Image (cartoon, rainbow, N blue to C red):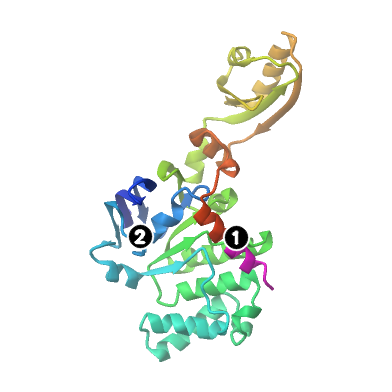
Amino acid sequence: MREEVIRAEGLTKIYNKSLVAVDHITFSVYEGEIFGFLGPNGAGKTTTINMLITVLKPTEGTASVLGFDIVKQANEVRKVIGVVPQEYTADEDLTGYENIMLCADLYGIPRDIAKKRALELLELVELTEFKDKRVETYSGGMRRRLELACGLINRPKVLFLDEPTLGLDVQTRAATWEYIKRLKREYGMTIFMTTHYLEEADTLCDRIAIIDHGKIIVTGTPSELKDSLGGDIITIAIREDADVTEIIKGVEDVKEVRREDGAYRIKVAKGEVTAPKIIEALRSRGFTVTRLSLTEPTLNEVYLEYTGRAIRDTEESREEFMAQQRTLRRARKT
């Protein structure tokens, strides 16, 4: 049996007695795994993290981190966790080294121990040669790596990462992924992260919970979630203005047909076998196929299956949108 590091039961947050940000969610995070909340901005990801790290008190439900109740034993929770927030928090007037030492002081870590750890962490995130440079001179990627180092100064048993690569370019994002993988590989750290990047969740997470409108829709490993679709996805469009759903359903091995925006999303066991059959069935009835695509299951397809829309089409809350814009502005600095 794997040890539960985080446990939430019916966790709920309601603002102003009307806005339900997190809606009675229940989940577990196990020792040594990277567990991800995948969903759009405004889905409740950051609110959940803020409750787990004791910044917000839940309206209903309970949660614990390493056995400590997030409300009744908040101080104990804070001692065993590290947090890398979505926004940059480092003081731009201080150097990278001074920022890490400041975090150490806030944790009450003795100076001699803190100095040693700070230098080790700067080496871990490849910032040693920039340790005496003011943070205002750092690029977005360097700032994110510094934030990671600050979150590790107390040697936490659980690390919370809120949108860890928001605003970073593709190359820097991939480098950040390697640092996160290293934390798990070399330190056995348990990591709870949020993201709206499908590739990031697929690459990093051992298990994923898809969250939408404050509710957990489905939880599983990336492979389990993809396999739950039961096969390949064919998307097809025709020239004629007609509904051919029933014709497609009648084709052998077609499991499900959904009409969306003038096209048809078709779930099949083996796309390369079934696609020609669908084309022939439509052609024989006088319809012309203008577009056809065949994809193996992806997390975007999983999200579409369970929520009814692609993650890129979801709307952002104003609060999280503004936070994202601030982070992006800082990330663009060089």
The residue to which callout 2 is attached is: 52
232 shown above or below 104: above
Q: Give the distance between the C-alpha atoms of the residues marked 1 and 2, in whole angstroms.
A: 24 Å
Q: In the rendered structure, which disc, 1 or 2, sits on the residue that comes first in sequence?
A: 2
Label 2: few (<14), some (14–19) or many (≥20) C-alpha neighbours in 10 Å: many
Q: Which residues are magenta?
A: 326-334
According to the image, label 1 marks what residue? 325
The residue depicted at 40 percent of the width and 43 percent of the height is: 215
Q: Amino acid at mark 2?
A: Leu
Q: Which mark is residue 93?
A: none
Q: Quadrant of residue 246?
A: top right
182 displayed left or right of 134 = left
Of residue 40 and residue 244, the one placed in the foreground of this image is 40
Is 331 contained in the magenta span? yes
Q: Compared with residue 167, is residue 314 higher up or lower down, i.e. above or below?
A: above
Q: What residue do we see at 61% from left, 73% from top?
A: 142
Q: Residue furthest left?
A: 72
Please determine whether, in this image, residue 15 is positioned above or below residue 86: above
Residue 321: x, y in percent? 55, 55
Q: Nearer the viewer, mark 1 or mark 2?
A: 1
Q: Residue 151: horizontal and vertical position, in percent? A: 46, 72
Pick the front one: 128 or 133 = 133
Residue found at x 48% / y 68%: 186
Secondary element type, mark 2: helix
Amino acid type at circle 1 is Gln
- Locate the C terminus and report the quarter of the image it occupies: bottom right
Q: Is residue 253 above or below residue 332?
A: above
